[in-house]
Image: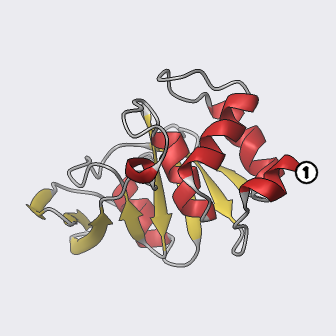
């Protein structure tokens, strides 16, 4: 698929061209429940927010569980920690998008266009976001749609868990 220039038509939508066809992707800003949590001023927590949204789990529960897996306060979350957490707690399947010589890498616009069904957590350069049924959920509605998607996790439906359920794992 050939991607061309993009434009920001308004907060809430990003557009681009795939094989000369204009594609419009809806972008929903969200905070994953952080504003109502014990940690409303936390930074570098896009993985916590994305996992909370994708698994329908409250922010504080996800934060505490990631901390138990080795996440450091305000320092972001390593891919290995996200992967371990999602395999154990969300039955998520890992999908890699490696660079291939002579081919363009998967990007956010292509990902949203190709994956119209299901819930995915995507990892791009220095950031993690959610794609649900082809719609992008991200803290910043002005994300670059041509950022490369390095990997994604497909989250099984019905993985919502309470704090009590997590304590028994």
Q: Does 103 appear above or below 22? A: above
Please identify the quadrant where the N terminus is shown.
Answer: bottom left
| Residue 125 position within the rendered picture, expressed as x and y whole percent measured from the top left | 42, 33
| Residue 128 position within the rendered picture, expressed as x and y whole percent measured from the top left | 47, 43
Residue under the image location 36 percent in, 54 percent down: 138
Q: Which residue lies furthest to the right in this view?
A: 168
Give residue 26's quadrant in the image: bottom left
Q: Is residue 61 left or right of residue 122?
A: right
Q: Does 1 appear above or below 71? A: below
Residue under the image location 79 percent in, 59 percent down: 91
Q: Is residue 110 left or right of residue 51?
A: left
| Residue 44 position within the rendered picture, expressed as x and y whole percent measured from the top left | 42, 30
Residue 106 seen: no
Q: Nearer the viewer, residue 33 or 129?
A: 33
Q: Nearer the viewer, residue 40 or 97?
A: 40
Q: Which of 66 and 97 is in front in this view?
A: 66
Residue under the image location 20 percent in, 51 percent down: 142
Q: Does 92 appear above or below 135? A: above
Q: Does dot 1 land on a helix, a strand or a loop?
A: loop
* Residue topped by disc 1: 168
């Amino acid at each position: 698929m050939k991607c061309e220039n993009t434009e920001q038509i308004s907060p809430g939508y990003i557009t681009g061209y795939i094989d000369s066809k204009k594609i419009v992707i809806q972008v929903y800003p969200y905070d994953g429940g952080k504003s109502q949590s014990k940690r409303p001023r936390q930074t570098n927590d896009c993985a916590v927010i994305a996992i909370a949204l994708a698994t329908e789990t409250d922010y504080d529960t996800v934060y505490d569980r990631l901390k138990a897996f080795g996440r450091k306060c305000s320092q972001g979350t390593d891919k290995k920690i996200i992967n371990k957490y999602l395999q154990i707690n969300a039955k998520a399947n890992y999908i890699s998008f490696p660079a291939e010589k002579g081919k363009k890498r998967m990007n956010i616009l292509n990902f949203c266009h190709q994956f119209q069904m299901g819930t995915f957590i995507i990892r791009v350069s220095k950031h993690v976001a959610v794609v649900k049924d082809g719609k992008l959920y991200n803290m910043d509605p002005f994300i670059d749609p041509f950022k490369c998607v390095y990997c994604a996790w497909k989250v099984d439906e019905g993985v919502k868990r309470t704090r009590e359920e997590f304590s028994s794992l």
